[in-house]
C-alpha cells in the first residue's frame, strides 16, 4: 500500500522567512498530489494540487513542487506570517482499475510561525 | 451553500451502543468519504462512495457500515461501539472535475466511547 511521510511533526519558522515542508511517498506515483491546511478543531481545507506532469504550481505566497523521480513534493510558504501557523497535510489521490480509490493522507506537519 | 454538514459535533457512547453519524453535502458531488483522525495516526479512510448506491471499504472499515441512497447523504453507522472507536470523524465530498478530486471536509464529529 502507499505510504506517505511528512518531514517532521513540528516545524518552527521565524516570521518573514520561507517555510518548506516535505512530503515523501513510496510505491507508485499518484496522478495528483494535494496539500491541505488544518486548524485545531476544524476539518482540513484544500490549498493546492499538482499533477504528475507538472513540476511546480503557485498560488499567492504558496508554491508546490513535485518530483516523481525522487517521489517527493515540497510545499513552500514565502514571507510567512503567524496566521500561517497550522497543520499542513499532504494527500495522494489513488487510482485502481475501478477508478479513484480515495485520498491517502500523511500525518501532517505542525507549522509554527514565531513573531 | 452549506458545503458538507456533519451531525452531531460531539457524542459520548457507552461500549456496545450503536449510532449513526450524519453527513450531508449540497454541492452535488458524486464522491463522498469518511475518515477518522487519531493523534499520531493522521487521517485514515474508513469507507467511500463514488455515487448513489455504490460504496467501498477504505483502510479501516471494521466496525463501521455505510450506505448511499442519495447523492446528498452518506451516513456512517457504528454497529457496536468500542473504546477503540474513540476518535474525530470527518466526512468529505469531492468532484472529479478535470480529475482533480479536491476534497471538501465537514467540521468533524468528536466521538468518545466509554
Image (spheres, coloured by chain):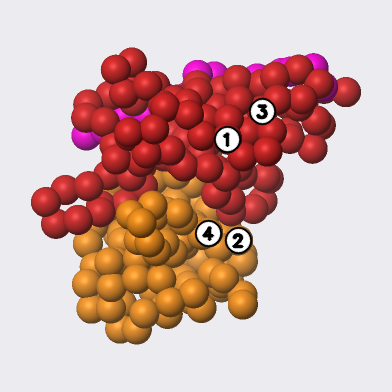
Q: Which residue is mark 1?
A: A58
Residue A7 is one of the magenta-drawn residues: yes
Marks 2 and 1 belong to one chain:
no
Depth check, mark 4 against mark 1: the one in front is: 1
Q: Reading the chain from its start, which is encountered first: label 3 or label 1?
A: 1
Helix, strand or loop under label 4: strand
Asked whether residue A85 appears in the rendered view, the answer is: yes
Q: Which residue is mark 4?
A: B105
Helix, strand or loop under label 1: strand
Q: Is disc 4 surrounded by few (<14), some (14 to 19) or many (20+) residues within 10 Å?
A: many
Q: Residue at x 35, y 61 (%)?
A: B96
The chain that hosts pointer 3 is A
Q: Looking at the picture, how far across and down is residue B11, in whole percent? A: 57, 66
Q: CA distance from mark 2 to mark 4?
A: 7 Å
Q: Which mark is residue A77?
A: 3
Q: Which chain is orange?
A: B
- Compared across the picture, whether B12 is left or right of B50 comes to right
Depth check, mark 3 against mark 2: the one in front is: 3
Q: Looking at the picture, how far across and down is residue A77, in whole percent? A: 66, 28
Amino acid at each position: 500500500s502507499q505510504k506517505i511521510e511528512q518531514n517532521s511533526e513540528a516545524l518552527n519558522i521565524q516570521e518573514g522567512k520561507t517555510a518548506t515542508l516535505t512530503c515523501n511517498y513510496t510505491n507508485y506515483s499518484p496522478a495528483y498530489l494535494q496539500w491541505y491546511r488544518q486548524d485545531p478543531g476544524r476539518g482540513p481545507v484544500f490549498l493546492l494540487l499538482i499533477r504528475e506532469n507538472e513540476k511546480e504550481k503557485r498560488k499567492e505566497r504558496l508554491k508546490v513542487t513535485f518530483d516523481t523521480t525522487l517521489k517527493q513534493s515540497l510545499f513552500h510558504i514565502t514571507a510567512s506570517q503567524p496566521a500561517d501557523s497550522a497543520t499542513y497535510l499532504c494527500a495522494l489521490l489513488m487510482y485502481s482499475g475501478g477508478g479513484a480509490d480515495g485520498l491517502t493522507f500523511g500525518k501532517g506537519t505542525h507549522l509554527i510561525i514565531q513573531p | 451553500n452549506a458545503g458538507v454538514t456533519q451531525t452531531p459535533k460531539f457524542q459520548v457512547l457507552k461500549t456496545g451502543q450503536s449510532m449513526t453519524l450524519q453527513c450531508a453535502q449540497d454541492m452535488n458531488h458524486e464522491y463522498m468519504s469518511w475518515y477518522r483522525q487519531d493523534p499520531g495516526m493522521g487521517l485514515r479512510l474508513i469507507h467511500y462512495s463514488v455515487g448513489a448506491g455504490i460504496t467501498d471499504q477504505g483502510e479501516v472499515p471494521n466496525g463501521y457500515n455505510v450506505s448511499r441512497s442519495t447523492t446528498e447523504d452518506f451516513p456512517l453507522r457504528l454497529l457496536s461501539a468500542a473504546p477503540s472507536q474513540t476518535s474525530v470523524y470527518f466526512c468529505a465530498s469531492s468532484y472529479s472535475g478535470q480529475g482533480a478530486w479536491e476534497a471538501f471536509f465537514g467540521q468533524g464529529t468528536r466521538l468518545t466511547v466509554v
